């Protein structure tokens, strides 16, 4: 039995647009995802999040299921357009009430809430009226939204995450256009990322100045990163792997932990990469109380050349390939999930060590890790043994990293239940609990029982 530290946090995670539904209820305004999913051809099978898991109406049932499965923590996001239907201006009291009731329900069942302020569902009005994340004004608008959330929920919420995966908002939302707001550009991802980082910093400043002393909570940012292993031991491939990591994770973590963008990005992008003011740098540096990490897979990295062109698959998480000169491939021998992502637990351990070295041994929380499978209910059961193997192996890698001195403090499974998987619609199932989207019925999978035992034992066999 591999036992974890006594204070280790065990949880599951979801996001507002992916599970809530109720898109026209409770005074909620439209988000960019409400608009994007209704454009023909954007989402697999024409699926939308209009209803999805109907968590908006079934949250008490869902919290009861979490409690039954022994979960200790639950990470969810707030839909900005439920709080501010127009993105700013008048607060929607029904939106405040919904999340307040959810938080109370969690606490009544002994489950600790971890709240993400932004998981990609920008109020549509801000996109239409001020160009969303491309406008510097949005940083202060986001900070005001954050202030409202801290004031409304911070008496009970002690774990805050400003942004979920700003890399995805930047690259998939503003680069290749496969996610809302669906823009295609080689320059806008860097502009959007810049304002996302400024917004994070301003929200943290509000929390630390106005709320942290009295509420005694913690605040951070969650970035996503997949490991990049050099294809060969050549100097060129090792440099390519390092460059890929800096363009992926360093892009967002370096400003927070080191004060500015990675030098390799400045060298390669020149004036396409915006510059932080001295005030921005001061607010950003040290603006996270923990290192939130979403991690799913690993790819092999090599130096691009005419005979080895850059990786171009948008789901390969390569970013803007021509800016990096890196080719990414998967080892054919790796087992794959239905997302096509390799199951590579040792990549997780290597990434944790990379973060530890580069950023001065921060406290790390894995805020998402999971896999998709073709889950089918048979006789009222879902036997997802491969998901159990996935989490067992990744947790073993995490345990090894902890034994080697990595300050890993928590692990959240993505996801508590099957949900709307963005451009993939309902075709991809990540959940510990199966959802029948026609009826809303929740069916615990074998992995839910397995994870419940892991949490109870505080360890994995």
Image (cartoon, grey):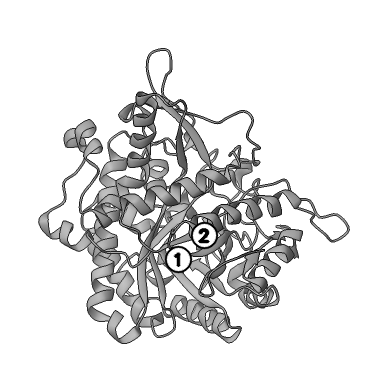
Nearest the camera: 461 or 124?
Answer: 461
Location of the N terminus by quadrant is bottom right
Say whether residue 138 is visible.
no
Location of the C terminus by quadrant is bottom right
Residue under numbered circle 2: 17
Q: Is residue 245 left or right of residue 1?
A: left
Nearest the camera: 120 or 14?
Answer: 14
Q: Residues within 10 Å of mark 1 (few under 14, many from 20)?
A: many
Q: Where residue 358 appears, x then y in whole percent?
A: 31, 50
**Which of disc 2 and disc 1 is earlier in sequence?**
2
Residue at 55 percent across and 73 percent down: it is 73
Secondary structure at badge 1 equals: loop
Say whether residue 338 is visible.
yes
Instruction: Tell me the quarter of the picture where residue 160 sits.
Output: bottom left
Q: Where residue 375 appears, x then y in whole percent?
A: 74, 50
Q: Is residue 129 left or right of residue 19?
A: left
Residue under numbered circle 1: 79
Above or below, 7 relative to 388: below
Q: Residue furthest top?
A: 307
Q: Residue furthest left?
A: 278
- The reply to whether dot 1 and dot 2 touch (C-beta < 8 Å) is yes
Above or below, 283 relative to 46: below
Q: Where residue 369 appears, x then y in whole percent?
A: 55, 54
**Residue 380 numbered tag:** none
Q: Residue furthest right?
A: 379
Instruction: Tell me the quarter of the picture where residue 230 sits.
Output: top left
Above or below, 134 relative to 235: below
């Amino acid at each position: 039995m591999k036992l974890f530290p006594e204070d280790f946090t065990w949880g599951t995670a979801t996001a507002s647009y992916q599970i809530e539904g109720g898109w026209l209820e409770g005074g909620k305004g439209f988000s960019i995802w409400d608009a994007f999913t209704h454009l023909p051809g954007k989402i697999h099978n024409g699926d939308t999040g209009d209803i999805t898991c109907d968590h908006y109406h079934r949250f008490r049932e869902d919290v009861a299921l979490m409690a039954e499965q022994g979960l200790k923590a639950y990470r969810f996001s707030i839909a900005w357009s439920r709080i501010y239907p127009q993105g700013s201006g008048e607060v929607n009291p029904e939106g405040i009430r919904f999340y307040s009731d959810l938080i109370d329900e969690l606490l009544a069942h002994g489950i600790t809430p971890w709240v993400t302020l932004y998981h990609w569902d920008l109020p549509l009005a801000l996109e239409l009226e001020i160009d969303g994340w491309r406008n510097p004004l949005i940083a202060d608008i986001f900070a005001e939204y954050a202030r409202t959330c801290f004031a409304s929920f911070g008496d009970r919420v002690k774990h805050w995450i400003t942004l979920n995966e700003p890399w995805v908002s930047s690259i998939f939302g503003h680069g290749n256009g496969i996610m809302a707001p669906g823009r295609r550009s080689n320059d806008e991802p860097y502009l959007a990322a810049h304002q996302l980082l400024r917004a994070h910093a301003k929200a943290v400043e509000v929390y630390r100045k106005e709320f942290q002393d009295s509420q005694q909570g913690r605040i951070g940012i969650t970035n996503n990163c997949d490991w990049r292993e050099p294809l060969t031991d050549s100097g060129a491939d090792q440099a390519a792997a390092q460059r890929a990591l800096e363009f992926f994770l360093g892009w967002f973590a370096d400003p927070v932990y080191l004060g500015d963008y990675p030098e390799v990005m400045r060298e390669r992008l020149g004036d396409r990469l915006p510059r932080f003011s001295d005030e921005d740098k001061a607010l950003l540096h040290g603006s996270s109380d923990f290192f939130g990490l979403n991690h799913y897979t690993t790819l092999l990295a090599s130096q691009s050349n005419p005979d080895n062109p850059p990786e171009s698959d948008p789901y390969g998480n390569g970013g803007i390939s021509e800016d990096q000169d890196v080719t990414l491939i998967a080892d054919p021998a790796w087992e794959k999930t239905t997302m096509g992502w390799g199951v590579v637990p040792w990549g997780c351990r290597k990434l944790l060590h990379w973060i530890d070295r580069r950023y001065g041994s921060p406290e790390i929380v894995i805020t998402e890790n999971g896999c998709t499978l073709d889950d089918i209910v048979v006789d009222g059961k879902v036997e997802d043994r491969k998901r159990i193997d996935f989490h067992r192996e990744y947790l073993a890698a995490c345990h090894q990293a902890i034994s080697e001195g990595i300050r890993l403090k928590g692990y959240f499974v993505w996801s508590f239940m099957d949900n709307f998987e963005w451009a993939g619609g309902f075709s991809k199932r990540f959940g510990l609990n199966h959802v029948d989207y026609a009826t809303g019925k929740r069916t615990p999978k074998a992995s839910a029982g397995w994870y419940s035992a892991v949490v109870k034992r505080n360890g994995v066999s």
